[in-house]
Image (spheres, helix red, strand yellow):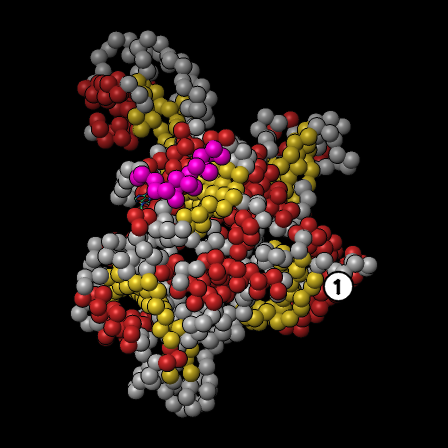
Amino acid sequence: MSYTMQRDLFSPETTTEQTTGLFADVVFDRPLDHPFTYAVAPELRERIAVGKRVRAPFGRGDKATVGYCVRLSETPPERQVKDLLGVLDDEVLLTDNLLRLTRWMADYYLCGWGQVLNAVVPAGARDKAGTRTLTFVEAVPEAGLKELPTGETPVSPQDRTGETPVSPQDKTGGTPVPPKQAAVLELLRKAGKAIEQRQLMQQAKCGPGPVEALVAKGLARRVARRVDRFVDSTHGEETPAGPVVLNDDQLGVWNQLEPALKQGGFHAFLLHGVTGSGKTEIYLRAIEEVIRQGKEALVMVPEISLTPQTIQRFRGRCGEVAVLHSHLGNAERGGHWRRVAAGHAQVIVGARSAVFAPAKRLGLIVIDEEHESTFKQESTPRYHGRDVAVMRARLENIPIILGSATPSLESWHNAQRGQYTLLSLPQRVLDRPLPHVGLIDLRHEPPKRGRPSAISDGLDYAMRQALKDGGQVMLLLNRRGFSTHVHCPSCGHVETCRFCDLALTYHKERDIMLCHYCGFEQEPQRNCPLCGQSAVRYQGLGTEKLQVEIEERFPRYVVRRMDSDSMRKPGSHARVLSAFRKGLIHILLGTQMIAKGLDFPNVTLVGVVNADMGLHVPDFRSAERTFQLLSQVAGRAGRGPQGGRVLVQTFTPDHPCIALAATHDYVGFVSAEMAHRRQHNYPPYQRLARIIVRSRDQQAASAFADQLADAFQRTLQTLFAQSPPEVRLLGPAEAPVFRLKGYYRFHFQLQSPSAALLHQVLRDVLPAQRMPGGVEFTLDVDPFNML
Ligand code: ADP
Ligand code: ZN
């Protein structure tokens, strides 16, 4: 039914009588925290259900707007309400628990429930992308008409509206059927089931004529079926690895997990195990256990580890695996989603958004690499996939395992206070040692003549040794591009982005100057645009420049680069990894893309070109991130019997995050870092909310930031008139990246030891704010990005 028709049907004159009846609460994709009530006309009562999408008049001019029905009630509202215009979905898209989970998210992250719901159900599942209605043909059994199985709509040639066909009669009256038709009929009868019409014509090598004739004679009939036609691209080489015998540490862990899995009920575990300690083996056992109970398991991994390798490991052991992540096309994503909703998948593996998998019999959630920042979504709703997963486990009343070699300080803190049960795998399997990590102090490198080099003599020597012995080398440099800033040696000018406060990076392969924040591109200039004089200099080191240097140093070896520039083509990631595995690549260099999760036994040397790169970022998590990255990349070395080692180049070898990563001392690092966090009132001791005010007009942004900060100050003074304030306001100040994408940005933070108090303050202040034109603000609860 078209929208205009419905408008006429439910125009004000025909509004449903509202003293009795059915009323629907609807939320829209807007930052509003309350639902709107609509009357449900009798025609829609059969179709409406909580969790379905509806169309309703909303906003200025009562525009027909899509929203989600979140509640149905027979109690009439106090005021006359408008009528719903229509119901969009045939099936409910959300389970009760997902509705509760999203409601909680709207409260916790202070955004609209409708905004959350819109992010939860992938577009491919909403619009049935990848499903198609196809016409099938089947033989009409001689002995009268059989009941059609449910879910199928018969179609007769004249009537394609989906009504039950009139019982066709055999009008042939025994006259012989022409040979072509007979052949088609024979095919259909032999098949004993409906065949898709085009396939049938192919098999019978005929056109539509004979099929049409058979249908007209009542010997065959057409059936419409909705079929899933997505191509599952997540299949690869299967690696059916059998279960291994657990070692003593793994047994210790398993003995604590098994009862919780058997018993069910909410229980959160933090599995801290060094790289290669057999964590995945534990996940697999746990999953096998819940599958045995007839339940489903959800496995969340960072986007970057969703390699065919990871997926195959689960496929090899755990039955039907569905894959959910945002890089799949709409149709494929929708297809996997519907498989999960229909209960056809035992294991769901996916990235952040998989936490919303519509599984109905969830028995376990696993989050691998729980510390990864990609679990945090940086657009509305700004949720943390790990925290939402813990909440979901609570709602489903099931166990959850958070695993990592370097747990986040938040999770470690939760384990320390007994919220999570800590499980440890302190050693690698099969007595494989952790690799030796050597630090190369760049402050003591002898100065070189000519071009500065990225590789010290020590690292160069170690690479030659490793390659000579038949090993492979990985080099980490966490910055892409050729040079990180382009500088004029005579006037000092540095080319910056037209829209951001950031230097442009020169990308040599594409011969372009690129802003890494907003994607702005500009032609490179050979002479300084300011003084026009001298040739500009390409300074700073990116992966492209490193590749040039390495290829010059090691002309006899195959060097490949892996970063988001070289991996733009779909499938290139898998291709390079496969070639590296086969030994066709000797040196693999790249950004953090190469640091995570990969298991290449022949890598005997890992080099970190500059360990300090992320350390001086104005973000309280910079040390934690550096420690994590170094530990991760070190974990790539020595996974095979020949062992291996790591060399880290740094200007700050004494910084705890570098010194303690070198000795694989996670516990030492967290104790040092925890003390620091406590002293500076940072998470996990305090909760944070960050507010960014932005505008293209600097004055307007600044004025509104001041106004908002004043409003918070007043509320804080009222709330904490007598006591010392338990919520503190820091700022407003210019954000570290002051100008971004053409917007001027001011930010401030609220800190509190109590999440509840923080929420109370935010709820008191924010809804009352009137935004001046051209000014926007974003609220980030538990922020990860501090720039
Ligand atoms: P992690 O997830 O902690 O990095 P994995 O579970 O991937 O560790 O284990 C690393 C390697 O050791 C894998 O190849 C795995 O099959 C193997 N492995 C795990 N547990 C055992 C065991 N008890 N005995 C032998 N090999 C094991
Ligand atoms: Zn920019």
Where's residue 454, x and y in %? 33, 75
Mark 1 element type:
helix
Q: Nearer the viewer, residue 473 or 498?
A: 473
Q: Nearer the viewer, residue 369 or 38?
A: 369
In magenta stretch: residue 754: no
Q: Main secondary structure of the magenta part?
A: helix
For the C terminus, the quadrant is bottom right
- Tell me if 496 is positioned left or right of 596 in this view: right
Which residue is label 1 attached to? 713
Residue at image location 62% in from the left, 42% down from the top? 103
Relative to 435, say whether 286 is above or below.
above
Relative to 135, say whether 300 is above or below.
below
- Tell me if 55 is positioned left or right of 475 in this view: right
Residue at image location 47% in from the left, 50% down from the top? 370
> Dot 1: few (<14), some (14–19), or many (≥20) neighbours within 10 Å?
some
Where's residue 729, x and y in %? 69, 64
Q: Residue furthest front?
A: 248
Relative to 620, say whether 578 is above or below.
above
**Amino acid on which disc 1 is placed:** Gln
Where's residue 595, x and y in %? 36, 59
Q: Which residues are magenta?
A: 244-261
* Quadrant assignment, res 217: top left
Relative to 184, say whether 716 is above or below.
below
Q: Nearer the viewer, residue 531 or 245?
A: 245
Q: Is residue 36 visible?
A: yes
Q: Is residue 332 visible?
A: no
In magenta stretch: residue 246: yes
